[in-house]
Every structure is written in C-alpha cells, then in structure tokens.
C-alpha cells in the first residue's frame, strides 16, 4: 500500500487564493485557460427556458455561456449572452410575430450539430497564443472541448472562451495585450 506522507507548511501565512489577478502568457499551455469540467461543473439551462431567464441564470453563475439541456438532462445546445443580447432574438421575434417573453432558449441556441469543437488531445498540444489565434480566425466566442472514451464515445471535457483568453492575455499594468491577437478576438467574439 502506498503511504501519503504529511509535512508542515513552510510559510506562516498565505495569500487568499483567487485574490491576485491571474494572467496567461502566449507560450503557456492551452489547458491553463480551459474550463475543465473534471474540476468545475458546467452551467446549464433548460431548452424550454425563456431567454431572459437563461441570461439571468448565467449572470448569477458568473458566466457568458451555458449548455442547453433537454427534458432528459442531455446537452442539446449552447447559448451565450451574445446570442441573447444580440440580434438573434429580434430576428426570431419578427419571423414568428411574437414578443421577447415568448422566445425560448431552444429558438436561438447553437444546436450540438452546429458546433465546431476541438478534442482535448489537440488542446494538450497547443499554447494560449494558438487558441487566441483560432478565436480571431474562426470568429467564435466559445469552443467546446471533447474527450473520446475508450469505447469511442465523445463527451464534453471542457470549454474555451474567447473573452476569457483575451482577459487573461491582457496586462493591466501595461495597458496592452501580450500577443496582439487579443484585440482581434474582442472584435469577433
């Protein structure tokens, strides 16, 4: 049996975790900017929820994106604050002659079949600069990261966010971004 040895802490005090602003460098591993669902639960909203309810739920959770689930708790899509606050609701309202209160998440969400995804094995091989470049080039706001089981079944492993990458690459003390690509990400994401 393996034994876990304990030692005394070497410091007499520590900074509160999460208080110091966290930054990423372009050469850092892409995994450092990914939300890993093995460590943090994903945020979900019902496909039948009104879009403003979904937005409020995302705001409360501190996220700009949520996975959409059906009545069987299966992920069927993705909804972002950009989808809800952008032109999608108005276009849907005009096409159906309905009010905003009647627009449901399922009406404007990005269905799973429409997703662009990356595999975790790809993310393990690239750096933050490559992720920022991809967001700028593909004009995506979020990228679901998939993992393939030994049985060949895909499952959600994580999520990359263009806004998070841009924020982490920015250096507040210098007032500029580190790579030059973050400004492009903001315009498109």
Image (tube, helix red, strand yellow):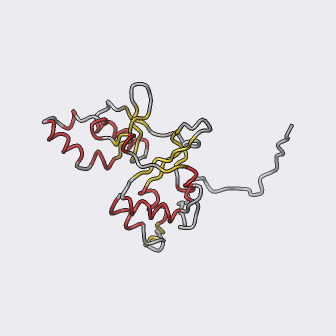
Quadrant hosting residue 94: top left
Image location of residue 61, percent across then percent down: 43, 42
Judge from the rendering whether residue 109 lies leftward or rightward of residue 6; answer left or right: left
Would you place residue 12 above or below residue 80 in this image?
A: below
Q: Which residue is found at the position 38% from the left and 44% from the top?
A: 59
Nearer the observer, 175 or 189: 189
Q: Say whether residue 52 is left or right of residue 130.
A: left
Q: Position of residue 36 (x, y in %)?
A: 55, 46
The residue sitting at 39% across, 40% down in the picture is: 112
Quadrant, the N terminus: top right
The residue lying at 46 percent from left, 68 percent from top is 172
Farthest front residue? 152
Q: Nearer the viewer, residue 185 or 167?
A: 185
Q: Quadrant of residue 84?
A: top left
Task: Determine the residue positioned at 56% across, 49% down.
Answer: 120
Q: Residue 135 placed where, x, y %?
A: 41, 59
- The answer to whether 24 is drawn above or below residue 35 in the figure is below
Q: Position of residue 44 (x, y in %)?
A: 42, 36
């Amino acid at each position: 049996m393996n034994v876990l040895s304990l030692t005394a802490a070497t410091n007499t005090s520590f900074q509160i975790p999460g208080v110091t602003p966290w930054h990423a460098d372009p050469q850092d591993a892409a995994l450092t900017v990914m939300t890993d669902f093995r460590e943090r639960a994903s945020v979900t909203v019902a496909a039948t929820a009104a879009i403003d309810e979904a937005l409020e739920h995302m705001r409360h959770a501190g996220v700009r994106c949520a996975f959409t689930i059906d009545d069987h708790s299966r992920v069927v899509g993705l909804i972002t604050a950009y989808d809800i606050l952008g032109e999608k609701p108005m276009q849907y309202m005009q096409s159906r002659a309905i009010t905003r209160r009647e627009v449901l998440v399922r009406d404007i969400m990005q269905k799973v079949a429409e997703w662009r995804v990356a595999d975790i094995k790809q993310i393990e091989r690239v750096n933050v600069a490559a992720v920022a470049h991809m967001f700028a080039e593909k004009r995506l706001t979020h990228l679901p990261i998939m993992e393939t089981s030994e049985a060949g079944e895909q499952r959600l492993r994580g999520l990359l966010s263009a806004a998070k990458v841009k924020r982490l690459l920015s250096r507040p003390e210098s007032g500029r971004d580190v790579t030059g690509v973050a400004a492009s990400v903001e315009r498109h994401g």
